Amino acid sequence: MTLRELHDAARAALDPVTYDYVAGGAGEERVLAANERAFDRYALLPRVLCGSETRDTAVDLPGAPGASPVVVAPTAFHRLAHRHGERATARAAAAEGAVLVTGTAATTAVAGVVAAARGTAADPAVWFQLYPHPRRDVTEALVRRAEDAGCTALVLTVDSPVFGRHTRDLRNGFTDLPPGYAAENMRGLPGAPPGRPAAITMSPAVSWRDIDRTRRMTALPVLVKGVLHPRDALLAVEHGAAGVIVSNHGGRQCDTVPAAVDCLPAVARAVAGRVPVLLDGGVRRGGDIAVALALGASAVGVGRPVVWGLAAEGEAGVRRVLAALRDEYDHTLALCGGRRNTDLTGDMVVRREETW
Ligand code: FNR
């Protein structure tokens, strides 16, 4: 099955409201569409006669040595997609050597997610994503949970000072999880109602000071997710980020921002190799991964395709998505005369308009 077919199978399997929750974006979904379309404007200029029978596509990421260049981006509520939920995703990512970013909005607590990954691989890399909470004690409790569970890095999502307005969810009245499902990491936090999970809170008052505080709470590397402006990338490095993730949240926040990949070159220039830069948004083929790596990313994140794999075929479906993307990328690398990821360089990417 191709990724397109997996998507169609997922659509058929899912409740239409859940499908819309995953597939949809903010506003008129212009950014959602732009993320994928942007990749069509880039073409690869291969090098010849410099390849190798064997290629090494592994990448060293914070808390994840020798990882696949395809990272599972944090997406909420996997139990809505498949009854095995985040555990199935964790097993699949571990089996494929891919970093799994599990998050605050997971329907399985982080300890259960890491345990599932450990059932498959001895040393899986699971990162924990959180929104910096205006209450320091709440952020600290979440950080401790991630540490205790065995996560190897934290991801602070900074593109969500307020909730995005997801047009399809508003139309469908999807404002809360159905009975029987909860954001399990939010249970028992300071200020939470007894026995019930606290609401995930976002605040436009969160600032770089909160990033500093969070960083001081933990020895884990902290990546900053949701950076588009090169000056913010620079600030992230200055504030001690171990990595910068270029992302517009899959088109689910501001519907007037550029496609994620179009923001990558300026961010990569600003970061200048001091920490890894990752990109997510619209990555659907091996060629997209090659373009992103050539434009300065160390790895890419994939969001929706993983959920489609999960919905269609559970653990096996997620494995299929991760393996297909990695294999297609390896094939593209071979076609471009590369032996390793760093052989893909900026001069090997051109705008299609310029070539036609
Ligand atoms: C997301 N994303 C996201 N990001 C984050 O930091 N915390 C979260 O809880 C979520 N939740 C979430 C749910 C769903 C259903 C989607 C589709 C996305 C954003 C995600 O990490 C990533 O940035 C995008 O999904 C990447 O774009 P693609 O690969 O879906 O095009």
Image: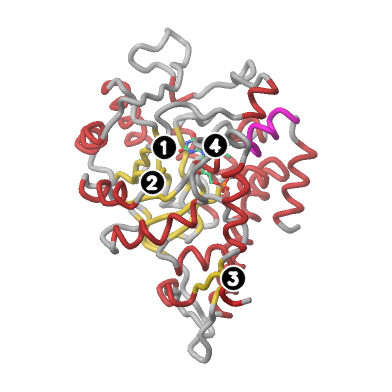
Prevailing SS of the magenta stretch: helix
**Any mark on residue 227, and which?**
2
Of label 4 and label 1, which has the lower sequence position? 1
Name above or below for residue 326 compared with residue 4: below
Of label 3 and label 1, which has the lower sequence position? 1
Q: Is mark 4 within 8 Å of ligand 1?
A: yes
Crowding around mark 2 (Cα neighbors within 10 Å: few <14, some 14 to 19, many 20+) is many
Residue lying at the far top of the rendered structure: 194
Instruction: Describe the element under mark 2 as helix, strand or loop.
Output: strand
Kind of residue at disc 3? Arg
Separation (CA) of disc 3 from disc 4: 27 Å
Q: 94 or 143: which is nearer to us? A: 143
Which residue is identified by label 3?
352
Separation (CA) of disc 4 from disc 2: 14 Å
**Any mark on residue 277, and which?**
none
Which residue is identified by label 4?
252
Residue lying at the far bottom of the rendered structure: 49
Kind of residue at disc 1? Asp
Of label 3 and label 4, which has the lower sequence position? 4
Of label 2 and label 1, which has the lower sequence position? 1
